[in-house]
Image (cartoon, helix red, strand yellow):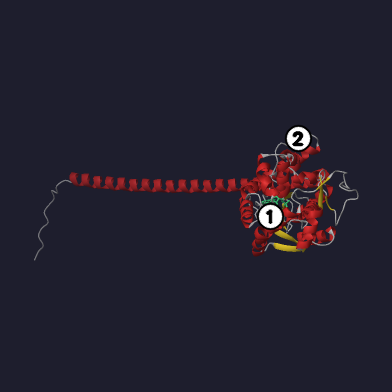
Amino acid sequence: MRIVLLGAPGSGKGTQSKLIVKHYGIPQISTGDLLRAAVEADTALGRQAKAAMDAGQLVSDELVLAMIRERLSEPDARDGFVLDGFPRNVAQAQALDELLGQMARTLQLALLVEVDYEELMERMTGRRTCESCGQSYNIYTSPPKMDEQCDQCGGNLRHRADDNEETISNRLRVYDSQTRPVIEYYREQNKLRTVQGTGEIEQIFNAVRRILDSLDEDAAGPDAPPEIAPTLEDLEKMVLATAMQAHDTVPVTQTPAVKKASPKKSAVKKKVATKKKPAAKKKAAVKKKPAAKKTVGKKKAVGKKPSAKKTAAKKKKIATKKKAATKKKAATKKKAATKKKAVTKKKAATKKKAATKKKATAKKGASAKKKSAVKKSAAKKKPVSRGRKRAPKKK
Ligand code: AMP
């Protein structure tokens, strides 16, 4: 799921983002949170951003885009994300499309949380956030049980430096002039959906959920690389590996290409995984996650162990295929041999015939020669006739 939450400062998009994280198990990427963390840690980026933030102005696109590029390339954002507070102007929206395009991904939805101007003012001036767990309160609409103390973890509640009336007015002006056009940008792309951001948080989230659940559940996205079907060799390797695992022998060192689960199945799996996720993981969605944590072991990539019955069936299938291949090969060989033999025979016969003919012709020639020689010599030897001359015929 790749979505953007839009809305004026104080519209509650941060609160809804956190609920989305909890329900769908995708990380929230809030540029405001990332910038505040940088300011607090007094990094170079934080020092550069602080003045603009204190004045309620936008931090430069260059800084924010570098931050987003880095955050989106982290492993936990591969399966989806909810962007909160970004993009804040059309240039950022265009840069996001480009960046996702480079990653062979597209944005699926821009969700606008709409709230009246007066209510926004009240919400922001009354907003308090827990320093330890990030839980949000509002001293007017959803106050903590104890003043300035978090109900969940007892941490101190903080009033954001930029949540004073002057800065708030500036932020709302900036929103009107720079961020509102982003709504049109996504409307034109047919990606915009709207929820009313007033009322109970749970009710608003129900509306959000209805929209998100209607999204195409194919988490891999339309540009995902094609699935790779296992070859016969892969299947053999898989069966062998499974058999070896079943007998507790050496660990699997090679991972065969396994066909991905259907989108429907992966969506169900995701939901289960989300429910099982510990609270610590949710917090980590905001902060940086070490890459090693997300790396899946090679053994895991093979997937669920098939049952003995399935393994036997697979083995049988492979054996049958192999047998058929061997049979075919032998038949082809035999055919070729027979053909070769016939050709050789034919050739020999032709040769013999030709030789016989030649011989016969030669013999005939020889006897003709002989005959003429005999005739010649006979003619030579014939004596001159000495007999009486025939008397001339009487007239
Ligand atoms: P937020 O918590 O989203 O209201 O952001 C607090 C402040 O951080 C804003 O008033 C801006 O100064 C700065 N900021 C947050 N996100 C952005 C952004 N996408 N582009 C520029 N500045 C931002």
Would you say residue 214 is visible in this rendering?
A: no
List the residue tagged with mark 2: 251
Q: For the view shown, which residue lies furthest in the left direction?
A: 395
Would you say residue 40 is visible in this rendering?
A: yes
Query: Which is nearer the eye, 201 or 102?
Result: 201
- Against 335, is 110 above or below? below
- The residue drawn where x is 76% and y is 52% is 164
- Under circle 2, the secondary element is loop
List the residue tagged with mark 1: 221
- The residue drawn where x is 67% and y is 42% is 47
Query: In which image quadrant can residue 366 be found?
Result: top left
Query: Which is nearer the eye, 149 or 84?
Result: 149
Return the x and y of residue 350 as percentages of the image width and height. Answer: 44, 49
**Image side of residue 371 versus residue 268, left or right:** left
Return the x and y of residue 269 as percentages of the image width and height. Answer: 79, 51
Tell me the amino acid under the disc marked 1: Gly
